[in-house]
Image (cartoon, rainbow, N blue to C red):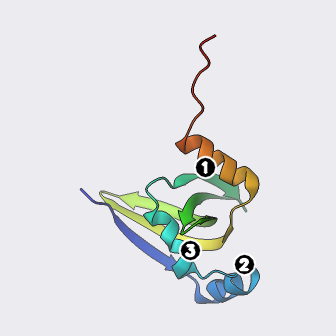
Amino acid sequence: MKRRIHLEWDERKDRENQKRHGISFLEASAVFDDPNSWMFPNYRHGEERWCTIGLIGTRFYSVFHLYDQANDEEYFRLISARESEPPEIRRYNFRNNPEPESHS
């Protein structure tokens, strides 16, 4: 069964994000279309936030958001989005292509 995704964000934060990072939340939401995207907890400001790293075209992006799920539906409230930093890209690549074990 295909999951249903619900996206929301604050329009003011979206405009600020576009000015600061050059990407809108609508554009950044494409990370959720990457079948290899990686979502992990990212605790900030006393609340459980999440980060999802994924490919949009040929570039990696990190989207920070709140997350909830019920049944087969997922809810995302986007907080920030930017191009991924090199350590994040390495973790994404390692997660999707772990190095084979050495058999010495």
Please rate how many residues cluster around mark 2, counting C-alpha atoms within 10 Å: few if below 14, some from 14 to 19, many from 20.
Answer: few
Which residue ends up furthest to the left in the rendered image?
1
Residue tagged by mark 2? 21
Quote the CA–CA distance across marks 2 and 3.
11 Å
Which circle's residue, 2 or 1, is located before the other in the chain?
Answer: 2
Q: Tell me which residue sits at (40%, 63%) in the image.
A: 74
| Amino acid, disc 1 | Tyr
The residue wearing badge 3 is 28
Q: Secondary structure at mark 3?
A: helix
Q: Which residue is mark 1?
A: 92
Q: The residue tagged with tag 1: helix, strand or loop?
A: helix
Of the 4 image quadrants, the one containing the N terminus is bottom left
Cα distance in 3D space between marks 2 and 1: 20 Å
Q: Looking at the image, which residue is at 59% across and 13% down?
A: 103
Residue type for callout 3: Ala
| Quarter of the figure with the C terminus | top right
Within 10 angstroms of label 1, few (less than 14), some, or many (20 or more) residues? Answer: many
Residue drawn where x is 60% and y is 47% of the image: 93
Q: Residue 95 at x, y = what percent?
A: 57, 42
Of marks 2 and 3, which one's residue comes earlier in the chain? Answer: 2
